[in-house]
Amino acid sequence: MKFADLHLHTQFSDGTFTPEELAGHGARLGFAALALTDHDSIEGCVRMAAACAAAGIEFIVGAELTAEHEDTEVHILGYFLDPENQTLLEKIAGFQAVRQDRIREMVAALNKAGVPLQVESVFALANCQSPGRPHVARALVKEKLIGNLDEAFEKYLKKGRPAWVPKTKMSALEGVELIHQAGGLAVMAHPGLNRTDEIIPGLVDAGLDGIECFHTKHSTATSERYLEIAEKFNLLVTGGSDCHGFSKGKPLIGGIKLPYENVEKMKEVVAARHSSPATRH
Ligand code: AMP
Ligand code: ZN
Ligand code: FE
Ligand code: FE
């Protein structure tokens, strides 16, 4: 049976694998298709596409957009994105600038709290356009300013702590629209983590195409619940490991094996839209 993993991160956001390493793991585990979904980035997709092609794996250009809906953070996955879509590239560059400014604010707050971290060491360690709190935490550990990642979040980075800086986010509706105008499918990521099912009808009205029923942190009961919701709202069913390499313990790739028929259904929707754009919602 063919299977896919449609939720993966690399060093181009907060994962630890290079695209080549990730494709290598995908090949070793027998995946037929992989999607790269770095946070607010498609930077790694060119290398991931080449590495997957070399390994005989089908590759899907994706991204995980950080958004909010009614004051709740919600991650919107985009699949089959046109990597040359100018609006997508411009908007992503804007979100990345916001992320980089937030890093500067977090480091300034750390300095104010007496922690001598330099912003350059965070950017050097992140070495990507889409840095986030995990990079600040890793830099703190690397510079021996804290014992480990958990402590970094507990002491400084989590909400309410001295270096916590809120994130300016696009609305989920904007995220769905941005993905659609770039030719992609918009999918709600890991709904079981947010437990905000009441926002699903609004997202469906905005044109949401699918929902991530299978995720490493979903129990069997949770997956079943979202399969029912997918059926009710006529949404595509997706799934992925949300592997970040070694940044959060063991690599998760291989833990979720989405039957390839789900990818086929996604491709049918994309193909139908391309042949008759007027029917696109
Ligand atoms: P950001 O989007 O920049 O606010 O960072 C969020 C990321 O930080 C997510 O990927 C979380 O998994 C990670 N994170 C949040 N809390 C912790 C923690 N206590 N230890 C390690 N990672 C964390
Ligand atoms: Zn992440
Ligand atoms: Fe997420
Ligand atoms: Fe993710």
Image (cartoon, rainbow, N blue to C red):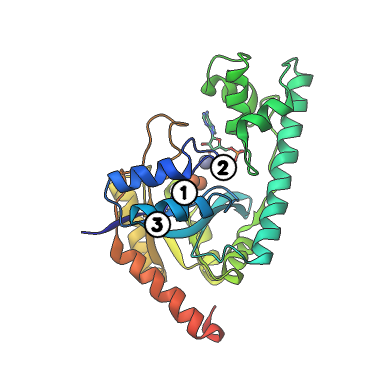
Residue 8 pos. (x, y %): 44, 47
| Image marks 1 and 2: residues in contact by CB distance under 8 Å | no
Residue 213 seen: no
Mark 3 = which residue?
Answer: 53
Picture quadrant of residue 193? top left
The correct choice, above or below, for 176 with respect to 54 in the image is below
| Image marks 1 and 3: residues in contact by CB distance under 8 Å | no
The correct choice, above or below, for 47 with respect to 260 in the image is above
Q: Left or right: 108 with respect to 7? A: right
Looking at marks 1 and 3 on the same chain, the residue that comes earlier in the sequence is marked by: 3
Tell which tag, 1 or 2, sits nearer the viewer.
2
Residue type, mark 2 in image: Ser
Does label 2 point to a residue whose CB lies under 8 Å from ligand 2? yes
Mark 2 = which residue?
Answer: 13
Residue type, mark 3 in image: Ala
The correct choice, above or below, for 272 with respect to 54 in the image is below
Residue 276 pos. (x, y %): 51, 86
Tell which tag, 2 or 3, sits nearer the viewer.
3
Q: Residue furthest left?
A: 1
Local crowd size for mark 2, using a 10 Å CA cut-off: few (<14), some (14–19), many (≥20): many
Residue type, mark 1 in image: Arg
Give the CA distance from mark 1 to mark 2: 24 Å
Q: Left or right: 256 with respect to 84? A: left
Mark 1 = which residue?
Answer: 195
